[in-house]
Each structure stands twice: as structure tokens, then as C-alpha cells.
Amino acid sequence: MRKVYLLKNSGFRINIQQPKEISTARSALYKSTEAMDDRSKRRNVQVRYPARLFIDGRCVKDMFPDWFNVLGTNRLVGFNTKLTKEEVLGTSQNQGRIPMRQ
């Protein structure tokens, strides 16, 4: 992204791919009445990542208030990430065998 300026007036564009939730939240913020009114008054209106509406450098609306708190933690806690060979193959150890009598 450092050399994006080289594409100016070339006909090529850079588009950042975002999840559907973020893109819909950002478009809703951009089309909100607050943003439209302040744009008509020539105020500085920005939609920043992930989906925050800033007017004149002040955050007015945040669609995901706990976004950075969730991202700052380990979301894999409590999940067993290592699978055994049987779990990968979808079989159990005793499948297809005759049970032993005791």
C-alpha cells in the first residue's frame, strides 16, 4: 500500500476486501442522516475501520464498540486444536471389531 500513489490517473483502483458485516455497517454509517447533514454543512466526515463515524475528528457513532477488545484476546481458548488420527478419519478405535468378552 506504500506505492498506491503510482496508480493515480492510471485507471486502476485498489479495493480492500472486508467481511460482509463490516461493509454493510460502513455503508449504513456513510448513508446515515448525521453523515449526510454534516457533509452538506462542509464538515469533515470520515468512516474509519472497522465501522466508526467521525465528524470533525470526533467519534460520533461506533457500530462495533467491542471490536478491539475481542481481537486483543485469544479466541481459541477452550478449543482442542489437535485432532487424533481417528477424529480426522472419522472412525473410532473399536469400529468394525468384535468386542472382547471379559
Image (cartoon, rainbow, N blue to C red):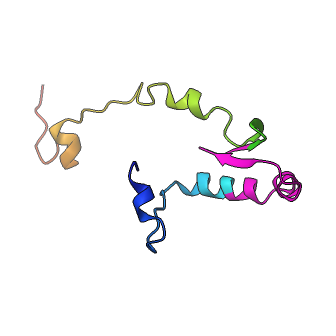
Quarter location, residue 84 = top left
User: With 93 as the anchor, is 38 left or right in this view?
Assistant: right
Question: Could you say which is closer to the camera, residue 31 or residue 11?
Answer: 11
Quarter location, residue 79 = top left
Is 56 placed above or below 13 here? above
Is 88 placed above or below 69 here? below
Percent from the top left, x then y, of residue 54?
Answer: 74, 42
Quarter location, residue 39 = bottom right
Residue 93 visible in the current orientation: no
Q: Residue shown at 42%/56% (left/top)?
A: 4
Tell me if residue 31 is in the magenta stretch. Answer: yes
Q: What is the magenta range?
A: 27-53
User: With 33 as the anchor, is 10 left or right in this view?
Assistant: left
Tell me if residue 26 is in the magenta stretch. Answer: no
Image quarter (top left, top right, bottom left or bottom right) of the C terminus: top left
Question: Could you say which is closer to the camera, residue 49 or residue 8?
Answer: 8
User: With 85 as the anchor, is 10 left or right in this view?
Assistant: right
Percent from the top left, x then y, of residue 49?
Answer: 59, 44
Percent from the top left, x then y, of residue 19?
Answer: 52, 54
Q: Residue shown at 89%/54% (left/top)?
A: 41
Question: Could you say which is closer to the camera, residue 14 or residue 43?
Answer: 43
Is 79 placed above or below 85 here? above
Q: Residue shown at 51%/54% (left/top)?
A: 18
Farthest-out residue, bottom: 11
Q: Residue shown at 10%/44% (left/top)?
A: 97
